Amino acid sequence: MSQSKEVTIYDLARKLNISIATVSRALKDDPVVSKKTKKRIADLAQEMGYRSNHFARNLRMQRTNTIGVIIPRINSYFMSAVIAGMENIATREGYNLIISQSSESVQKEITNANTLFNSRVDGLLVSLAYDTDSLAHFQPFIKKKTPIIFFDRTAEQQEGTCILINNMKAAYEATTHLISQGRRRIVHITATPKRNVYVDRLKGYKQALADQRIGFREDYVIVGNLSQEAGAEAAATIREMRPLPDAVFVANDNCAVGCMTALKQMGIRIPEDIAFVGFNNDPVSTVVEPNLTTVNYPGYEMGQIAARNLIDHLSGSSNIQSTNTIILRSDLIIRDSSLTRKPPVS
């Protein structure tokens, strides 16, 4: 089947018997063209299926008004909140987002980066995949002086800004809270230590144990992909430990809920037998019973700040190279899953 020919401004001008310049000005809403003529041109353009060639026009202007976004997973409440925050600022400032996901694969992340580079995005917002161990695929952007902001999952680099929370501090507070509830055999479920967020949360966990003179056990650190399924698999491992751990600190809420649910099905009481703390404050944390103690991670705010900093840099009102790291606040939200039950007063 042959493709239909693209309608051009020449076709519109020929049909209306007016100059190409008049059509061009009308489509740009130039006040030189009368409202009546603009309407005739707009009506015909719609009737004939004319599409403005934004790409060619943007090439002339050296600006596409698009921002590329690379995230690990779209099916994540936290990442959805981040994207919503980015959209809020980008739309307000006249930018479009091109969103791609790496699906936790560095190879797909490289493909996404190449696609966005060829799409001539004005800037890039990136949260890295689990297994990314090099930033070489972002070098073309750096060479072209296309600004990059890394958020949440970041890596040490000289170019651009990183936006994150103090993951070590948040994990330290979560673990210390469990210890304050009388828990001493605390398992930590996390992801690959390649990523800053998981490295720092493990550091915070270890530091809290050390400060309370509790020995660190390597077998108490369970590494997986932090899915609900991985939580259920971790539950099976925990159930076989002797003595049974009395608390679990998980690096995200979905995995925590998967682990809690599986342990409950095995007859483990929560929090009486094992207390739980998660991370991210996903909606699932208030649906599971008991409600999950978690770290509130401000995803929407992170998205807004990332987009705002990038757009301010593009407009020349700030320079992202002048601020290397932005730390956002996080809070521990204490719910029933981590609280030691006190006997009723007789």
Image (cartoon, grey):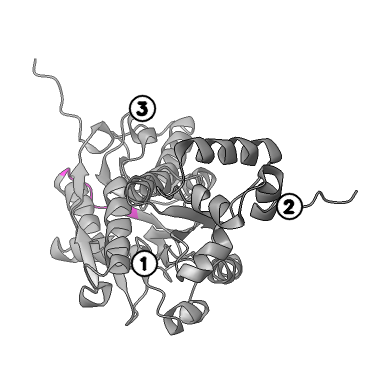
The answer to whether marks 1 and 2 mark residues whose Cβ atoms lie closer than 8 Å is no
Is residue 314 depicted above or below 256 in this figure? below
Q: Position of residue 178 (x, y in %)?
A: 21, 47
Is residue 327 something that shows in the picture? yes
- Helix or strand or loop: what does disc 2 sit on? loop
Residue indicated by mark 1: 150
Question: Main SS of the magenta segment?
Answer: loop
Q: Nearer the viewer, residue 196 or 334?
A: 196
Q: Residue at x 67, y 35 (%)?
A: 47
Magenta span includes 186: yes
Tell which circle, 3 or 1, labels the residue nearer the N-terminal end.
Answer: 1
Q: Position of residue 59 (x, y in %)?
A: 52, 69
Q: Position of residue 143 (x, y in %)?
A: 45, 84
Asked where in the image residue 286 lies, by quadrant, the reply is top left
Spatial separation of the CA atoms under disc 3 and disc 1: 35 Å
Is residue 196 depicted above or below 232 in this figure? below
Spatial separation of the CA atoms under disc 2 and disc 3: 58 Å
Q: Looking at this view, name the residue that lies furthest to the left.
A: 345
Is residue 25 depicted above or below 64 in this figure? above
Asked where in the image residue 171 lies, by quadrant, the reply is bottom left
| Magenta-drawn segment | 181-187
Residue indicated by mark 2: 6
The answer to whether marks 2 and 3 mark residues whose Cβ atoms lie closer than 8 Å is no
Q: For the residue marked with disc 3, what is the amino acid?
A: Glu
Q: Position of residue 195 (x, y in %)?
A: 40, 68
Residue indicated by mark 3: 289
Q: Nearer the viewer, mark 3 or mark 1?
A: 1
